[in-house]
Amino acid sequence: MKINIKVLQDYIAITMGSFIFAMGISIFLINANIIPGGVTGLSIGINYLTDGKISVGTAYLIMNIPLSLWGLKVLGKQFLIRTFYGVIINSFFIDLLQGKIPYFEFIRFHNMEAIQIMVKNDFFLFIIAGGIFMGLGIGIVLKFQGSTGGFDIIAAIAKKKLNLKPGHVFRAMDFFVIIIGGFILHFKEISSDRPAFTLALYAFVLLFCSTRLIDTIIDGFDYANSAIIISTKYNEIGKSIMDKLSRGATAFYGKGLYMNIDRKIIFTVIARREITLLTETVKKIDPKAFMIINNVHEVLGEGFRLRR
């Protein structure tokens, strides 16, 4: 059986990203008694409400099963495969680093002396570090066309069915989870050092740090790119750009001066994270296609955010 090297590389990167994400959760957030947004925050909340009887990784897996099945129905099989892999591997790593996996109970990085000292003496820096690990991990997963499940699925469905922007959906749900998390921390009296309200504010700081880092990893410092594609199969390529990337494409006439041949030229603007998918799509349709990809300073229009 022929192994698809590109797919294998994607899954290796998704695994690495999931491990980094799990480090942010297990070593930093849980130690700091922070309930972040997303299904991760809900999972930590369930862990607190059950007094640790349901581990964070187990709660994360349980909540993602119905969401994944919903995603399968609405978004298709290919979406589910990578999402479910990300969910399983995330759940495993979160519990592994907490020493909750049988035969691996000795792995308890969160109890390291250096970690405990940092929690007590430099709490704010500790929170920032957790946000960096979370953002870096999720950014790597998304960059390689993976998914961590959870609200990713809801946001994708909202975009497809209701044409809502995923970023708006994420922010609304994360805000709700953080507020609920604050009540859980207060009700269970989790932290004696800091009030629940303060921890909720820290959760918003962490959310800001992680989301900004995710944007940087996915979009890069040049957040948009333009592509010029010259091919005899311009119709097929243009259709694939619109179907697979959900981007607009414009075809205009050009003339090759060397051979004096009229050609159609395709112009499109994509996010940086979509470059790989675009080049793979074009080369699959026409291996002889000529492509030019440029950095774009600013894009004004649907599908792109303004630079800040």
Image (tube, grey):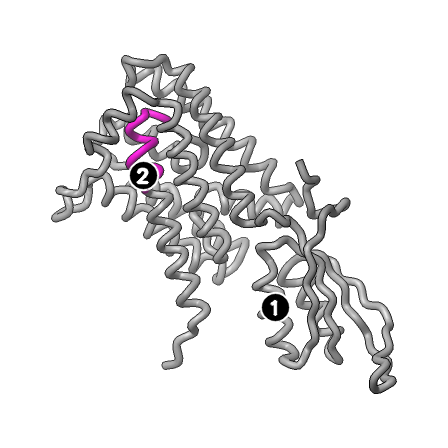
Identify the residue shown where x is 73% and y is 46%: 298
Name the residue beneath numbered marker 1: 279
Name the residue beneath numbered marker 2: 59
The picture places residue 69, in percent across and down from the top left corner, at 44, 52
In the rendered view, would you say 178 is above or below 267? above
| Three-letter code for the amino acid on which mark 2 is drawn | Ala
The picture places residue 78, in percent across and down from the top left corner, at 49, 62
**Label 2 to label 1: alpha-carbon separation:** 39 Å
In the rendered view, would you say 69 is above or below 285? above
Q: Give the range drawn in magenta.
A: 23-34
**What kind of element bears circle 1?**
helix
**What kind of element bears circle 2?**
helix
Q: Quadrant of residue 264?
A: bottom right
The N terminus appears in which quarter of the rendering?
bottom left
Q: Earlier in the sequence, mark 2 or mark 1?
A: 2
Which class describes the residues within 10 Å of circle 2: few (<14), some (14-19), or many (20+)? some
Identify the residue shown where x is 43% and y is 58%: 82
Identify the residue shown where x is 39% and y is 61%: 11
216 vs 199, left or right, is right
| Three-letter code for the amino acid on which mark 1 is drawn | Thr
The picture places residue 13, in percent across and down from the top left corner, at 40, 57
Which class describes the residues within 10 Å of circle 1: few (<14), some (14-19), or many (20+)? some
Mark 2 or mark 1, whichever is nearer to me? 1
